[in-house]
Amino acid sequence: MIQCFIFDLDGVLVNTSIYHFRAWQKIALQLNIPFTEADNERLKGLSREDSLQTLLQVGGMSIGQEEAEALLNQKNRIYLDLIAQIDESAVLPGVRIVLSRLKQSACPLVLASSSKNAKFVIQKTGLEDFFNEVVDGHQISKPKPNPEIFLTAAFLAGVQAKNCLVFEDAAAGVKAAKSAGMRCIGIGEKEPLKEADFVFSDFTRFSPEILFELYRSV
Ligand code: BG6
Ligand code: MG
């Protein structure tokens, strides 16, 4: 039985992944690290700190704690500048209708995002009221692919992990959901999300009715 729907934010509900990418690109340029969209795929879903470490790995570099702190702050300032004007138009196609339909079910809807800016983004995009609970980067100590974020989401919703369904666009997020013992639908390209139960290119391809077919137990 699916009793709780858990949503990642960046790249699942809103089109902010491109702004994270652009911000990391600027940092990469500053560090002289060639950084492509394919490299960025590895950063998706990771915390800000783990993203920086992954970027440094791509460039075969290591830096001290102080420089790392400065780069993390700089990346966030660039990202916040890029999303300063964000509004309802950043919500991805099909998302609002799916959230509205799932909201009519008795199941809680929980946001589970690695981002420390998640609350700001759901407020600005008008998504806040859909969620019964929000877990963001401030509340977790072990970021995705660790299952902590999704287990916290399930705990707050009062639902067992096996009865939760997670929507994710990142390989690290799919891994976290599966390690939590949850069902998981990938949103995006099939290849990076191959560990998900099913993958849809976006929410216009998905409807709550499909869940009956897919899992036959909702
Ligand atoms: C995730 C994004 O949702 O949040 C990552 O997929 C991002 O790209 C991470 O690095 C942390 O976000 P923030 O806003 O706390 O830097
Ligand atoms: Mg994401």
Image: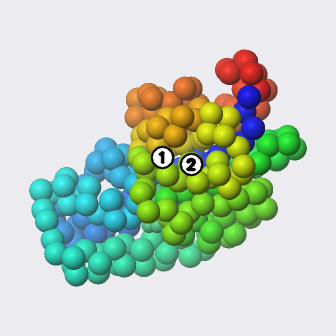
Q: Are marks 2 and 1 in contact (CB under 8 Å)?
A: yes
Sort mark 2 into few (<14), some (14-19) or many (20+) by Cα contacts within 10 Å.
many
Q: How far from the left and from the top, in percent, is residue 59?
A: 15, 57
**Residue 21 location, x and y as percent?**
39, 58
Q: Please state the quadrant of the image where ligand 1 appears.
A: bottom left
Q: Observer-nearest residue: 36 or 72?
A: 72
Residue shown at the point (48%, 46%) measured from the top left: 147
Quarter containing the N terminus: top right
| Quarter of the picture holding the C terminus | top right
Q: Position of residue 100 (x, y in %)?
A: 82, 47
Position of residue 72 relative to residue 55, above or below, is below
Q: Amino acid at mark 1?
A: Pro
Front-most of residues 137 and 80: 137
Name the residue carrying label 2: 151
- Could you tell me which residue is drawn at 44 percent across and 28 percent down? 194
Give the side of residue 127 with respect to residue 200, left or right: right
| Image coords of residue 124 (percent x, y) | 68, 70
Q: Give the residue number, with chain letter if any, for mark 1.
A: 147
Can residue 145 be seen here? The reply is yes
The amino acid on which the numbered mark 2 sits, given as a three-letter code, is: Leu
